[in-house]
């Protein structure tokens, strides 16, 4: 009886810890409200390319300049996860009806020791389903989970998720995988250390220059088409 109570207590503690470790789905509400205010003031531009996802998009301060003459809108927020992008999609994506959409997300979903790569893959498939239900004519471009100095221990797991997502995308019309991750590695397969700010996680101007060089030509091609 005592053993049963002990194991029951252990299960309850584990469940409580898991519950508290999950971020609140609406934790970025303030930022989303700011996006909506901006949209009402500036209007919607269906011909623009909408970039969304986590902080690697949010901190791309030179995005519009880097994509010129392509029209780009930045809707990256916080350190978001794919479920959070889906949660806010009807407010930050749908109203724009973008011709092209670029997504960078999934890194925060699995940058934890106890979360497997398949978590990000499953969430990505849910995002695909949302897009198909709401914006089936939008071309979508996925940027793979990136290598970084601070999260290097997760790189193998990130690669596993990238590989599965790429395989999924290759079977879908109007969905594309742009390999920005490989360009962030040196000739020895190690992440370049001079492309990040002090936190060794987010990119500096040199890092975003790499992304621009890889991403822009692909978007130019499909935007013209």
Image (tube, helix red, strand yellow):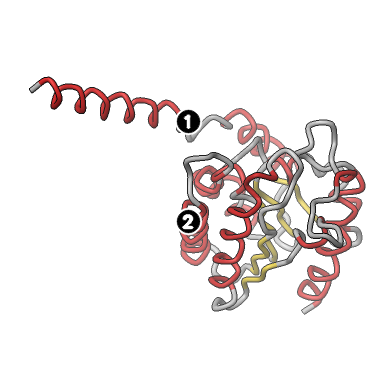
Q: Which residue is found at the position 84% from the left and 41% from the top?
A: 196
Q: Residue furthest front?
A: 3
Is residue 213 rendered to the left or right of residue 25?
Answer: right
Q: Which residue is found at the position 64% from the left and 65% from the top?
A: 140
**Please, is residue 132 above or below residue 173 in the view?**
above
**Disc 1 crowd, CA 10 A, few/some/many (<14, 14-19, 20+):** few
Residue 24 bears which disc, if any? Answer: 1
SS category of the residue bearing label 1: loop
> Which of the pair 218/38 is nearer the observer?
218
Q: Which residue is found at the position 47% from the left and 56% from the top?
A: 118
Residue 182 picture location, percent across and down:
77, 62
**Please, is residue 54 above or below residue 135 in the view?**
above
**Please, is residue 132 above or below residue 114 in the view?**
below
**Please, is residue 203 above or below residue 220 in the view?**
above
Residue 199 picture location, percent across and down:
78, 32
SS category of the residue bearing label 2: helix
Spatial separation of the CA atoms under disc 1 and disc 2: 21 Å
Q: Which residue is found at the position 23% from the left and 22% from the top?
A: 9
Residue 118 bears which disc, if any? Answer: 2
- In which quadrant of the rendered view does residue 14 lie? top left
Residue 130 picture location, percent across and down:
48, 59
Q: Quadrant of the N terminus?
A: top left
> Which of the pair 101/117 is nearer the observer?
117
**Disc 2 crowd, CA 10 A, few/some/many (<14, 14-19, 20+):** some
- In which quadrant of the rendered view does residue 99 lie? bottom right
């Amino acid at each position: 009886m005592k053993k049963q109570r002990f194991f029951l207590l252990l299960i309850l503690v584990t469940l409580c810890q898991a519950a508290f470790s999950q971020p609140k789905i609406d934790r970025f509400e303030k930022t989303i409200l700011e996006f909506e205010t901006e949209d009402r003031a500036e209007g919607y531009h269906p011909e623009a390319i909408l970039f969304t996802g986590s902080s690697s998009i949010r901190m791309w301060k030179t995005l519009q300049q880097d994509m010129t003459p392509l029209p780009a809108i930045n809707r990256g927020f916080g350190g978001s996860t794919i479920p959070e992008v889906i949660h806010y999609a009807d407010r930050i994506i749908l109203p724009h009806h973008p011709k092209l959409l670029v997504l960078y997300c999934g890194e925060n979903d699995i940058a934890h020791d106890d979360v497997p790569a398949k978590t990000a893959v499953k969430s990505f498939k849910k995002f695909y389903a949302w897009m198909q239900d709401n914006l089936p004519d939008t071309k979508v471009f996925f940027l793979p989970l990136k290598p970084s100095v601070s999260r290097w221990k997760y790189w193998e797991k990130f690669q596993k998720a990238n590989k599965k997502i790429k395989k999924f995308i290759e079977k879908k019309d109007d969905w594309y995988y742009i390999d920005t991750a490989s360009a962030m590695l040196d000739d020895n397969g190690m992440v370049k250390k001079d492309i990040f700010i002090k936190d060794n996680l987010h990119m500096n101007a040199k890092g975003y220059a790499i992304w621009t060089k890889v991403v822009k030509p692909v978007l130019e091609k499909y935007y013209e088409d």
